[in-house]
Amino acid sequence: MPDAASAPAVRASIGDSEFDRDTAVTRRAPGVYDTDLSAGWTIINAVNGGYLLAVLGRALADALPHPDPFTISAHYLTASQPGPAVVRTEVVRTGRTLSTGQASLFQLEEDGTEVERIRVLASYGDLDALPDDVRTTAEPPAIPPLEQCFGADDGPAPVEGGSAIADRLMLKLDPATLGWALGSPSGRGEMRAWFGLADGRDADPLSLLLAVDALPPTAFELGLRGWVPTVELTVHVRCRPAPGPLRVSITTRNLAGGFLEEDAEVWDGADRLVAQSRQLARVRLG
């Protein structure tokens, strides 16, 4: 758990935090939502993919009859920019326990042309209605206590362009996955960290969509640097997280042809696997 020095003086609550304000959408018409993408969630001058997924996830939560994302898959078509955007949703199917919808986020180019940035297909349900029966061989990641891990303020130098989103996160990295920051990447393609929001807001299903994409890229531990843009990201939300910091573990087993996969697991303080994801990302070689 965070110590007193790392905890915010006043904890934000779910529904009243910077994350909630910056992912807010306003319904303009049935299935059409206006939003304003905040520059506060950028890294290396690009809007973070998990933050963008949370924006679309919030619009779908309003458009569909069920409240919680169970599975959501996004294809990132063009790079999003901070500023105004429009989300258009469509209800594909509704059932008793699951509803399915799709959504796209659009922005205007300088010449006034509307460009689609992201397209999402998702199924929503009610996490509180799920049975408690859990049968798993998955185990929480072995991460040292939070006070033995390191954040952006502890390193010799921050990631270039990464300070905006870092200021909004409580992110403490496992020292075993920090070789890249010291000029000695391990080559193992692993990244592990404690995760939370800097204002103390507890996690919920929408912030889990951010958590799976908030750590430095595993490509750094493979000896590569620079922007690692997401091509496709699929997230499975398994249960509503308990209050307190989360543990996030991300691994890459295969980099080929300039693309790698990242498999993420998110665990809460009750040792429950609350979310999983896989993404395909592009890396710059050479």
Image (cartoon, rainbow, N blue to C red):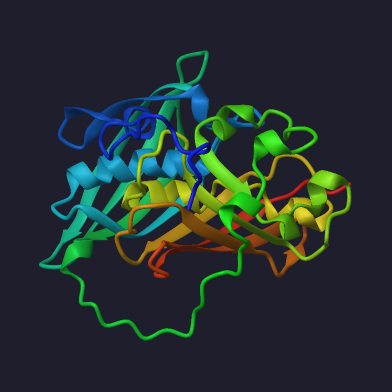
Image coordinates for residue 39, horizontal then vertical, percent: 51, 23
Circle count: 0
Q: Is residue 149 left or right of residue 279?
A: right
Q: Is residue 226 above or below residue 189?
A: above
Q: Name the outermost residue toward the top.
A: 111
Determine if residue 14 is in view. Answer: yes
Name which quarter of the figure residue 155 lies in.
top right
Q: Residue at x 70, y 40 (%)?
A: 227
Image coordinates for residue 229, horizontal then vertical, percent: 63, 44
Q: Nearer the viewer, residue 148 or 111?
A: 148
Determine if residue 75 is in view. Answer: no
Name which quarter of the figure residue 236 lies in.
bottom left
Q: Residue at x 51, y 49 (%)?
A: 195
Q: Nearer the viewer, residue 12 or 209?
A: 12
Image coordinates for residue 183, horizontal then vertical, percent: 88, 47
Image coordinates for residue 5, horizontal then vertical, percent: 52, 36
Q: Name the outermost residue toward the left.
A: 96
Q: Is residue 195 left or right of residue 9?
A: right
Q: Is residue 21 above or below residue 251?
A: above
